[in-house]
Image (cartoon, rainbow, N blue to C red):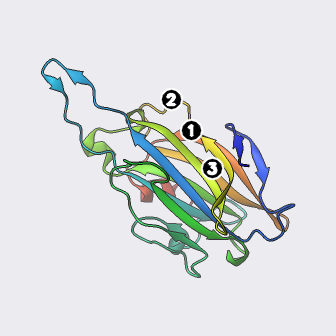
Amino acid sequence: MAINLVKGQKIDLTKGNAGLSKVVVGLGWDPVPPARGLFGVKKQANVDCDASAILLNEQGKLTNKLNLVCFHNKQNGNQSVVHSGDNLTGEGDGDDEQIMVDLKAIPSDVHRVLVVVNIYDAVNRKQDFGMIKSAYIRIMNSVGNSELVKFNLTDSYNGFTALLCGELYRHGDEWKFAAIGEGAHAAHINQLAERYI
């Protein structure tokens, strides 16, 4: 049975789960229905959310451009973190985008895998996370896809164009997960990544 976390909580993933090596980070969201105007439903452009993983060293720095795994760079150097591909609308049930992580294969200089979501072309489209509902991040065991932990992002993120959802991080020989749930301003994933250089 999955454990539901709240903002700020942390949980051990591998401690007591000795066989756990490969996990799937699933991210999901739905567009808020468009408002009804005087002449019917207002047309609204699709909100294209993009999930990414930023692989950071012990000092919290992004030291290799291949350690930004996103829609335009779908895997890191040794393929221990792999992106499933871009979902342009967020419609439908289940995860909208997934990131596969082989915890045992992550390079030793990577200590944190920060999972973020940003809105593609948010400034030009005048979009923000106030136009998104039911956002979540979850971690599943890739063997059998059993859900280990889930964090529903329920805060108001009006005005924000990026979300720091959660992170997998090393703790000695073990891996843990932290529920972050913080809004940020970054019109593109590269702008968000620059904060960690």
The local secondary structure at tag 3 comes to strand
For residue 166, the mark is 3
Label 3 and label 1: CA atoms lie apart by 10 Å
Q: Earlier in the sequence, mark 3 or mark 2?
A: 2
The image shows residue 21 at horizontal and vertical percentages of 73, 71
Q: Which residue is mark 2?
A: 156
The local secondary structure at tag 2 comes to loop
Type of amino acid under label 3: Gly
Q: Which residue is mark 1?
A: 153
Q: Left or right: where does residue 92 sit relative to residue 42?
A: right
Q: Earlier in the sequence, mark 3 or mark 1?
A: 1
Type of amino acid under label 1: Leu
Label 3 and label 2: CA atoms lie apart by 16 Å
The local secondary structure at tag 1 comes to loop
Of 112 and 31, nearer the camera is 31
Residue for point 44% across, 71% down: 73
